[in-house]
Image (spheres, coloured by chain):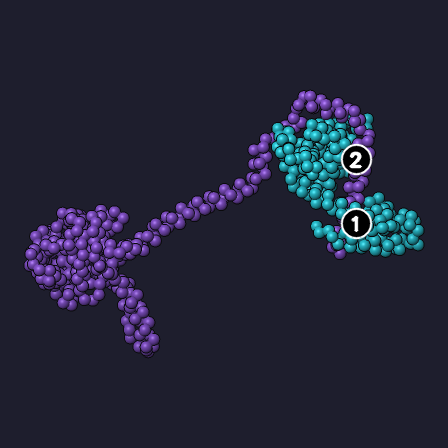
Amino acid sequence: MDEEKKIADALENYGRRVVFKEKIERVQASVDMEAMREQAQLLALEGITPVRSIGRVRQLWQTYRPTFAVAAAVAIVTTFATLFMVRYYRNSNQQQEQYSMLRRDVQAIKKSQNRILDGLSVRRKSLITVNPGQIVGSSFLLTPDGYLVTNNHIVQGADSVYVQSQSGEVFKARVVYTNRGYDLAILNIADDSTFRPGKTVPYGFDPRPSDLGERVFTLGYPRDEIVYGEGYLSSGTGYRNDSTSYQVAISVNPGNSGGPLLDEKGNVIGIISGKQVSTEGASFAIKTDYLYRAIESIPNDSLKGQPLKLSRRSTLNRLPRTQQVKRVQQNVFMVKVFKH
Amino acid sequence: MRDTIRLHWTDNDLLGGLASGSDAALTQLYNRHFPMVLHLILSNNGSEDDAKDIFQEALVVLYEHVQAGTFVLNAQLKTYLYSVSRRLWLKQLARKGRYSTLGPDDLMESDALVAVDNDLIEHERRDSQFDHMATSLGKIGEPCRTLLEDFYIRHLSMQDITEKFGYTNADNAKTQKYKCLMRLKRLFFSDYQE
């Protein structure tokens, strides 16, 4: 029985103390109080501290050492976790969420389409060939003999690249060169036998920096049909002060990536590359100057000996916008990228 | 007493002697450390009787701690006794209301102390149990009180108790003792919560 044990213990403790106290009384009566008083007097006279000093700080330290340890550990963990979270947020979150590359990811749409088809007819499932990862972007001719430019982020990791003209002709393209830093890629369709080289491209390529407020327009393939967009140059630098691009107030959508950005006189001043998601009307275009730089760094072997020369003169000057668009749109292609 | 003075007592010897209830060890503790406590109390508004009480209580704290087997001496025994006495005296001053003019740091703060908070909390618990037991024993009445005291405190054998109280045999005495213990239990636990 628990309580019985407890009461017996309590009783014994009680008894022990009673006995001990009696003993102390006895001893106390027997000691020489006179001598004690003298010694106490002595202590008072000397004013000595009876024992060696440990010091208050040390005592506090000894008492609270475990608490200190826990607090320090928590502080360290918190600090590093915060640092890690901040880095993580900056690296992944902002770039992925803020800056959106304007390629059109068809895979997701295809998947949901297939799911609907699967639902409609289970039997026909085997007949449907699932198209592997397909990405759509825009691109335009650099030279009449079949060189095109588009964004690196469209063609990277591609197994095969096709371009489709506005009239629906499809050409197989070879990736001549990619530059990850400028996000540019040069394609060539001259190898495709059905491609007929033209005489000129109507627009010129102007490497000089354009002024803020410049009226600009673009053509691209945010849908299967070519789409015209118009706006103005709003800043001389791009996303996070990226000096290789402009900020443009123009409405662009996934699929516009790689399209030309032209000024009123018909000069290509940039290549549409992306937009900032959180901000209204902030799209970005890579400056033509960097297109020139990219072309300069193409190895000669990739060009098969023929230099890639861009026309600096626009033939669109003074034409009304509708006429400009009519002539430019024949040179803007849809890029289709297949991946496995 | 004469022959113990010749011996050299270390702190551990003293503790051992205390645990085994040696008078010599107690005398030694008095001789060595009482003047210190006396000085402390006298120089802080206390009398010699106060000093005796305080030292006695400090020894009780030490004794019960050693008995419980949980005592670890991490400073000099002198420091420990001094720290305990100081705290006990502060508490007494506070009880008397004289404490208000005296901050806890005023009491010879230059002196070294060891942390005795836990020991004193434990002591307080034992103290209240002790007081409670005394009250309970007071209420239980005779012959129960004497019987229990004889058995548990004076450690008389069942045979002695049988003779002393005039029971016919030891079994009778045992039954009586058990009944008394149960009564004490009821009294003790009726308003004591550990």
Q: Amino acid at mark 1?
A: Ser
The residue beneath circle 1 is B136
Q: Nearer the viewer, residue B184 or A242?
A: B184
**Residue A139, picture quadrant:** bottom left
Q: Is residue A340 left or right of residue A65?
A: left
Find disc 2 in the rendering and name its residue.
A24
Q: Secondary structure at mark 2?
A: helix
Residue B137 position in % (x across, y down)? 81, 48
Which chain letter goes with mark 1?
B
Q: What residue sits 44% from the left and 45% below the top? A: A79
Quarter holding the N terminus of chain A is bottom right
Label 2 sits on what residue type?
Ile
Residue A120: give x, y in percent of width and height.
32, 77
What is the x, y in percent for residue A339?
Answer: 27, 62
Q: Is residue A332 above or below residue B159?
A: below
Name the secondary structure under disc 1. helix
Picture colour for chain B: cyan
**Camera-side residue: A145 or A80?**
A80
Q: Which chain is purple?
A: A
CA gap, disc 2 to disc 1?
24 Å
